[in-house]
């Protein structure tokens, strides 16, 4: 135990580096005795485990003395404490370890302040899958190797606007934006491929069915342009001379086809030539009296109807030009009649539907003689009317179109025989004179049967839808006993009016007809002067008015 006591004594006696021998002691125990020490000389405190500044404290300015400290980093790190060094300062007693090669172990083996820096630990990486997505990181796999924590599951690319498989392209493989056809009956790409919101694709085409039309376009986008329509096939239009060939083309409504050809324009038909000029589908049949050799016999009189629209133009040039009343004319038909004795004949074409001209020629129609009459534009219209006295013989009557440009041709010819000879009244009113002496007795008055004397007949014409009144008298200028009578059509018919021995008219043996109405319509009218008894003939004077 003594050595321990001795040490303690020394420590207590020498409190500071400046203590002097003989100075006051640290304790008052008499048993210890007094120790004299040299006097303390203060100086700057340094770290030397002494009280250099004689303040009773040792190394008090070095607060960290005795605290723990370290040296080196990583695997080189060592621990110690701060102690006084030879220079009077503090120093860490720890000594750094020796650096080694860096390993992949989470330790800074090479003591450079970095851990596993040679192994890119923590870097994103892609595992052994089919995508290129870095879904893992590099970690140590032993001390000198690494591995990627990404498993082998693959991120497939889906259609969602994201690069799911991390290859730098978005929605690749889905053909987005390409034209496509929706769920309709046509094959037209009227939409584009787009994402459907569920990772797949859809076509944006939501239009209805495009139906194929005939318009030069493949409307339904299948089977070609205008499929189902026979476009381009040969066709023809029109009949006869109007027939034209072409090809089928689309119609204006785009619903079918029509022929591209345009039919020719029809021209007036000429019958019997084997050509369908009016394009009705057949050559017209000629009227029976189209040619002179087929002239219809009208000797008995009557109304005769025939269509000369397709007849030939055989007769226009008159044999006596001064009697012609038309131009070169158009199509014509032929009639023939025979008179056994001299007689007045009447004709009209009021029932026809074209501008007509009627010519009467001497002789048969196959051997025309002189032009004897020409009738045109009667009663304020373009139809024909006329009457003339002809000698016994055969005659040809030709009904002609006034112009070669006329296309209509329904002919209605009325032909009447007058039943006697006669003279035309020169005007609608006036006076005619003559004598019955030497004439023939051709009729008997209805109001006086004793009229076997010679008579003279005057004729005039009336128009369709017209009623006229006739006044006539022999009151002056006539000496013999006269009878006046009116007849219509054939002069052998009954009287329309008859007058004999009118009081106050001449010697009271003369005749007077006043405002006698004639039947309505177109006809031949007669005013006949006759004589009474055995001596009733001679010179006469007839005053008349037709209103």
Image (spheres, rainbow, N blue to C red):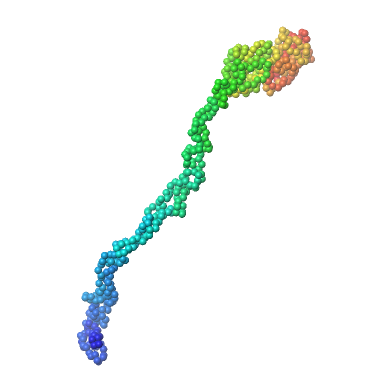
User: 71 or 59, which lies in front?
Assistant: 71
Q: Which residue corresponds to the image point at 68% horizontal and 16% vertical from the top-left?
A: 300
Viewed as shown, does residue 447 lie left or right of 306? right
Quadrant of the rendered structure where residue 129 is? bottom left
Extreme residue in the bottom direction: 30
Viewed as shown, does residue 64 lie left or right of 395? left
Vertical position of residue 112 compared to residue 33: above or below: above
User: 36 or 246, which lies in front?
Assistant: 246
What x and y, as percent, mark residue 225?
47, 38
What x and y, as percent, mark residue 546?
70, 18
User: 101 or 339, which lies in front?
Assistant: 101
Vertical position of residue 228 compared to residue 537: above or below: below
Viewed as shown, does residue 11 lie left or right of 168? left
Q: Which residue corresponds to the image point at 32% horizontal and 62% vertical from the top-left?
A: 146
What x and y, as percent, mark residue 273?
55, 21
Quadrant of the rendered structure where residue 39 is? bottom left
- Residue 209 showing in the rendered view: yes
Q: Which residue corresponds to the image point at 60% horizontal and 19% vertical from the top-left?
A: 290
Q: Which residue corresponds to the image point at 46% horizontal and 54% vertical from the top-left?
A: 198
**Quarter occupied by the C terminus:** top right
- Residue 475 showing in the rendered view: no
**Quarter occupied by the N terminus:** bottom left
What x and y, as percent, mark residue 436?
72, 9
């Amino acid at each position: 135990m003594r050595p321990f006591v001795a040490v303690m004594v020394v420590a207590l006696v020498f409190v500071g580096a400046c203590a002097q021998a003989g100075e006051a002691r640290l304790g008052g125990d008499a048993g210890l005795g007094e120790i004299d020490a040299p006097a303390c000389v203060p100086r700057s405190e340094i770290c030397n485990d002494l009280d250099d500044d004689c303040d009773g404290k040792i190394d008090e300015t070095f607060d960290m003395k005795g605290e723990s400290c370290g040296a080196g980093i990583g695997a080189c790190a060592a621990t110690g404490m701060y102690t006084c060094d030879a220079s009077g300062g503090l120093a860490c007693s720890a000594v750094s370890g020796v650096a080694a090669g860096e390993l992949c172990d989470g330790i800074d083996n090479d003591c450079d302040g970095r851990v596993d820096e040679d192994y890119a630990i923590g870097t994103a990486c892609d595992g052994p899958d089919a995508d290129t997505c870095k879904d893992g990181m590099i970690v140590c796999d032993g001390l000198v190797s690494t591995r990627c924590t990404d498993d082998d599951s693959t991120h497939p690319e889906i259609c969602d606007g994201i690069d799911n498989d991390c290859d730098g392209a978005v929605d690749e493989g889905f053909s987005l934006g390409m034209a496509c056809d929706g769920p309709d009956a046509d094959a037209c790409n009227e939409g584009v491929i787009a994402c459907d919101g569920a990772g797949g694709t859809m076509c944006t085409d939501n239009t209805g069915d495009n139906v194929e039309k005939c318009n030069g376009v493949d409307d339904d986008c299948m089977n070609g342009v205008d499929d189902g329509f026979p476009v381009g096939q040969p066709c023809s239009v029109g009949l006869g001379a109007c027939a034209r060939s072409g090809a089928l083309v689309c119609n204006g409504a785009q619903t079918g086809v029509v022929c591209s050809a345009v039919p020719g324009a029809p021209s007036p038909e000429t019958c019997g030539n084997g050509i369908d000029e009016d394009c009705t589908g057949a050559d017209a049949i000629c009227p029976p009296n189209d040619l002179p050799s087929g002239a219809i016999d009208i000797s008995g009189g009557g109304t005769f109807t025939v269509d000369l629209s397709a007849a030939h133009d055989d007769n226009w040039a008159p044999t006596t030009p001064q009697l012609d009343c038309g131009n070169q004319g158009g199509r014509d038909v032929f009639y023939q009649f025979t008179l056994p004795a001299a007689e007045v004949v009447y004709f009209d074409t009021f029932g026809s539907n074209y501008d007509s001209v009627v010519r009467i020629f001497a002789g048969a129609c196959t051997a025309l003689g002189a032009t004897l009459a020409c009738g045109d534009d009667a009663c304020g219209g373009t139809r024909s009317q006329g009457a003339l006295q002809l000698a016994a013989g055969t005659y040809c009557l030709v009904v002609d179109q006034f112009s070669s440009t006329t296309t209509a041709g329904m002919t209605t010819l009325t032909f009447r025989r007058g039943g006697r000879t006669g003279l035309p009244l020169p005007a609608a009113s006036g006076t005619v004179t003559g004598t019955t002496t030497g004439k023939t007795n051709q009729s008997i008055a209805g109001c006086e049967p004793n009229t076997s004397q010679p008579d003279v007949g005057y004729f005039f014409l009336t128009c369709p839808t017209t009623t006229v009144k006739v006044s006539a008298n022999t009151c002056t200028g006539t000496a013999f006993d006269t009878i006046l009578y009116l007849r219509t059509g054939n002069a052998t018919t009954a009287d329309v009016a008859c007058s004999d021995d009118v009081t106050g008219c001449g010697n009271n043996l003369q005749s007077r007809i006043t405002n006698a109405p004639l039947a309505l319509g177109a006809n031949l009218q007669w005013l006949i002067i006759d004589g009474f008894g055995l001596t009733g003939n001679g010179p006469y004077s007839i005053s008349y008015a037709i209103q």
